[in-house]
Amino acid sequence: MSATPLKKTPGDIVFALALGAICVAVLFAVVYPVYFVVIASVSNPSLISTGEVWLWPKGVNLFGYREILNDERIWTGYRNTLLYSVAGTALNLVVTIPAAYALSRPEFRPRRILMLFFVFTMFFNGGLIPTYLLYRDLGLLDNWLVFVLPSAVNVYNLIIARAFFEHSLPKELFEAAMIDGVSYLQYFARVALPLSKAIVSVIGLYYLVQHWNDFFTGMVFVRDNALQPLQIVLRDILLSNQAFAGGVGASGGSGTSYDQQYADQIKYGVIVVSSLPVLVLYPFLQRYFEKGVLIGSVKG
Amino acid sequence: MAESLVAARKPARKPVTGARRPGAGRHVRRYWQLWLMVLPAVGFVAVFMYVPMYGIQLAFREFDFAAGLTGGDWAGLKYFRQFFDSPLFWPLLKNTFVIAFTTLVVGFVAPILLALMINQIAGGRRKRVMQTATYLPHFISIVVVVGMLQAFLNPSTGLLTRALAPFGLDGVNFLGDTAAFVPVYVISDVWQHCGWNSIIYLAALSRVDPQLYEAAKVDGANRLQLIRHVDVPSIVPTMVILLILTMGGVLNTGFEKVWLMQNNLNLPVSEVIATYVYKIGIFSTQFSYATAIGLFNTVINFAFLIAANAIARRVSNWSLW
């Protein structure tokens, strides 16, 4: 921005200082809570409750994590969520990507009305009860497919993918292929898709995170504990204060205040364990996440 | 998605070959492969989105277990009257509005301010760090965010409670306090989504013609004036579209989060239409009544969307349709 080396005025300096201060404050407010959860999960809980843990973990112990590793619900939840996320994302991609491609072809006349058909659902829906009754009629209540089938298409993701196909694939490529007598399906599979790894991974990531964090489906449509995803298990442990496997700390004995303290440590640990996959992958994937937003906002 | 959603006035498309437009049958024969590709998505949306819309008629019928989604005798507006006459009607409406609008306004303004601010950072590296850090919380699940709120706001041991003690706020049970519910809800929402929502504005800002800055500087504009007269006007189209999109879902926002944050102490301010529908419908199985309340919610939503669109068209020439 400052290509012309104009002289720095006192106003500029004040501006820079204020900007720096606000940035540091914002950064702190955003990052510190996450950092604190991590250090609290390995610190002595009594030191946390008295406020002695600020910057570094103190009285390091892994008691919380040991308890978590021994808790079957967490692992059932993890396994379920993993299954739903992988199966769900696979279906999402198989359904969304070809549809986005078809909708991006300008000669496909019905595309306008079809877009309207999709976009309308972003603003209007049948509401909870008709949805619930439909799932009941389809036998999706207490069925793991409820985590996979109804969310097959996300209209935002469809629009992002369509925008990519519309703007990022060179038109000449399509024309050349058509002259060679290639059909749409062949063109899509052999030319468009291999050139679209970026958008497929972006959309795949969006869907994966959506499935990983899905709490609503389990809460409303599933009663069977064996089918519940990680987020429901988390709610039970974090918010409903359900006792941990065999009471807190089978090794810990009987003291209740002791139990409460360790229950808090376990909670921090559970937060870390459940968010770990997304947060560990995050630095590697954040470029993609961002790309999705940017592609979606490409000028049309 | 913003601009691709907008019905920008595009020139009419030329017919595919010559002047003759192919009929429907010919069209399908010619483009059957494209139809094949789009059909699964159409099917899923038809079944899972449009069938429930068809099921809305339940709001005007007596639910009959055997008849299911659309069966039962017509009941007219009975269930709407029941809702309007209910003593819960005004509190529910008020709570829903207060939460939705505070979230809408604050959640709309905060990402804009953040984007304008990040855009001012000079070093590319520092800019990246700031951006990356601020949208991290977007990927934390809602259950975990509420779990963190509970831990941090615990009246005796919470991190935030202790940090606020010097301000005379110690011992406040934020999650059980009717006055604190909305602020806690909104602030944590901003914490979680502000950075993410600012990305789209940053993209718009990065496309501003540098010559505009130079010209303004020559005219003697200082940094704040540059922001006001160059940056802000350049993101207005993005702002308008995001506003419309958010307005359309304004009363749907945060059912899950409100539900998770709800407790007996904050219930007078935290019971909203969506949570009430859940209780009445799923727990008490009053399906027709709950559908009617849900429909009321949807209709208001839709009215907001239309209003937002009309305003946007007036003030900025940008609109969804």
Image: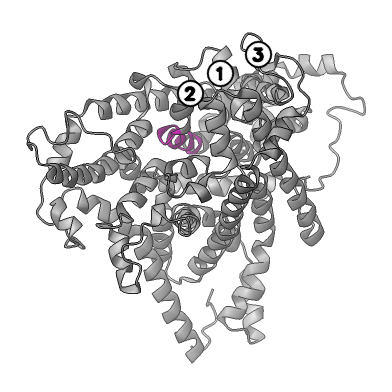
The residue carrying mark 3 is B64
Image coordinates for residue B29, horizontal then vertical, percent: 77, 14
Q: Which of the image's four quarters has the N terminus of chain A?
A: bottom right
Q: Amino acid at mark 1?
A: Tyr
Q: Which of B301/A296 is in front?
A: B301
Q: Amino acid at mark 3?
A: Asp
Check if mark 2's residue and mark 1's residue have beta carbons within 8 Å.
yes
Q: Is most of the magenta stretch helix, strand or loop?
A: helix
Image coordinates for residue B241, horizontal then vertical, percent: 68, 52
Dot 2 falls on which chain? A
Image coordinates for residue A28, horizontal then vertical, percent: 34, 64
State which mark lies toward you, 2 or 3.
3
Dot 1 falls on which chain? A
The residue carrying mark 2 is A221
Lower sequence index among marks 2 and 1? 1
Q: Amino acid at mark 2?
A: Phe
**Which disc is residue A135 wearing?**
1
Q: Is residue A209 magenta?
A: yes
User: Marks 2 and 3, Cα distance to the nearest angstrom?
Assistant: 20 Å
Disc 2 with disc 3 on a shared chain = no
Instruction: Please provide the residue range marked out in magenta.
Output: A202-215
Disc 2 with disc 1 on a shared chain = yes
Q: Is residue A125 placed above or below B8 in the rendered structure? A: above
Residue B45 visible? The answer is no
Image coordinates for residue A88, horizontal then vertical, percent: 46, 24
Q: Which of B286/B165 is in front?
A: B286
